Amino acid sequence: MSDVREAELLASVPDKLFIAGKWVAASGGGTLDVHDPSTGKVIRQIADATAEDAQKAMDAAAETQDSWAATAPRMRSNILRRAFDLLMERADDFALLMTLEMGKPLAESMGEVKYGGEFLRWFSEEAVRIQGRYGSNPEGTGTMIVTQRPVGPCYLITPWNFPLAMATRKIAPALAAGCTVVVKPAALTPLTTLAFVKLLEEAGLPAGVVNVLTTSSSSAVSKPIFADSRLRKLSFTGSTPVGVALLKQAADGVLRTSMELGGNAPFVVFEDADLGAAVDGAMIAKFRNIGQACTAGNRFIVQESVADAFAQKVTERVKAFKVGRGTDDGVTIGPLIDAKAVEKVGALVADAVKRGATVHTGGSAIDGDGTFFEPTVISDVKPGSDILTEEIFGPVLSIATFKDEADAVRMANATEYGLIGYVYTKDLARGQRMIDAIDTGMMGLNVGVASNAAAPFGGVKQSGLGREGGFEGIHEYLSTKYTLTPAHSG
């Protein structure tokens, strides 16, 4: 990849805040550094927003809310569709930008561009399909009119691991519903959001509808936004502890909330499974995004009779991975996001090994520039190991075994999380039982990736509230109003 191309692309990304349709410096003049995790080098300096900037962004969103809500659904739809078309035209640039600031291999970044773009296309279509109902009440004494209205200004907090898709998954339904937004991308990967909002501006988005705050202090920026009574909704993707803290703040304003929080996905392989397909699925479910996904397979729960064969097959595949900078040819595993991530993954592996797990390949951080960890397979993971209860968020495939179906269900559900589960079996009846028995908001049955813009994304238990994507996604940004009018006699 050309250094000149990278430099030109980075220079094209705005380095300021986007408030009321203008790119502005932070009120205090501060900046924050954005690093390339594959080298540790600073690749861009951008504005570091303050509480004063947050208030200005909230003012812009609130002042624009009524006019945006009154904008024809078709016009809102057309803007989102133009944004989709522009994104597809510039897919190479957005993919490279994500790889530079987040580290994932370029091919995976291109996949995220296509996935993230689908939320623009899907919700451009949903914008013109917001419906209500009209009819007589059961007593025949009046007419019931049910309408859907935008909830109002929204605060959208996106994570670092999918910089484009998490932005489009929140912004697109909000705009389709007629809501204005303040977006706060993660400080680790803010460049993709800035580039995307520049694209929205080009697509014809009116000033004030979307406002972006990049900051090194989430709490300082969030405080005035939460304190503003005009804010009506919070959408957050991130860890469960942070989500819980935000829910407490949202309670004071009785805000609508969508919370996509942590995961601890079980990946269950029965002895009757197509083992080749299960291994293929495991590679996607575990190692996509360098394992840094809330939907990543976290606990591989494999029936005893096939556990050794499964471990051998996945180890062969993992040993063939190429680790390196995501822009280099053939790389399948890039860096973890920062040094703390490497330290956490290393500690989880060390704890499992201390308790009796076997390392088949990998198991250690990689010395040198960047924050890399070896692609790892461990088996014989014992009950009580931290790796069974904590989200790994790294390229480590950990295998525990089960005896029978009841044992598999017990192990799969032995977590406070419930985002997604994966099951591999050829038995159709067993598959149906697993759909009913495993307590998650989503499931992949004989597939290793389930996310789709047309499907509702979200979890149960400590994995969150609400759904993003699908028909359900736009309703998170709509409030229902019921009106009764008296029946008219003929």
Image (spheres, helix red, strand yellow):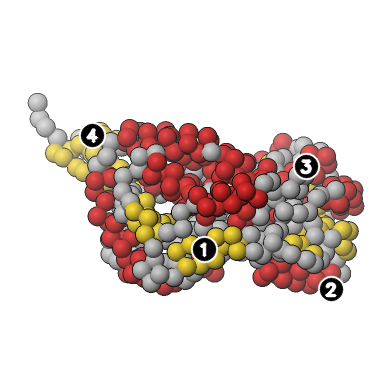
Provide the secondary structure element on which disc 1 rests: strand
Do residues under tags 3 and 4 come within 8 Å of each other at their CB atoms? no
Tell me which corner region of the image, top left, top right, bottom left or bottom right, holds residue 394: bottom right
Q: Residue at x 35, y 43 (%)?
A: 205
Q: Residue at x 27, y 51 (%)?
A: 65
Amino acid bearing label 2: Lys
Pick the front one: 80 or 367 = 367
Answer whether residue 441 is visible to the viewer in this image.
no
The residue beneath circle 4 is 136
Amino acid bearing label 4: Ser
Q: Residue 276, how many percent across, how many down? A: 83, 39
Q: Residue 30, how many percent across, how many down? A: 44, 70
The residue beneath circle 1 is 45
Amino acid bearing label 3: Asp
Residue located farthest toward the top when viewing the structure as drawn: 490
| Label 1, residues with CA under 10 Å away: few <14, some 14-19, many ≥20 | some
Tell me which corner region of the image, top left, top right, bottom left or bottom right, holds residue 101: bottom right
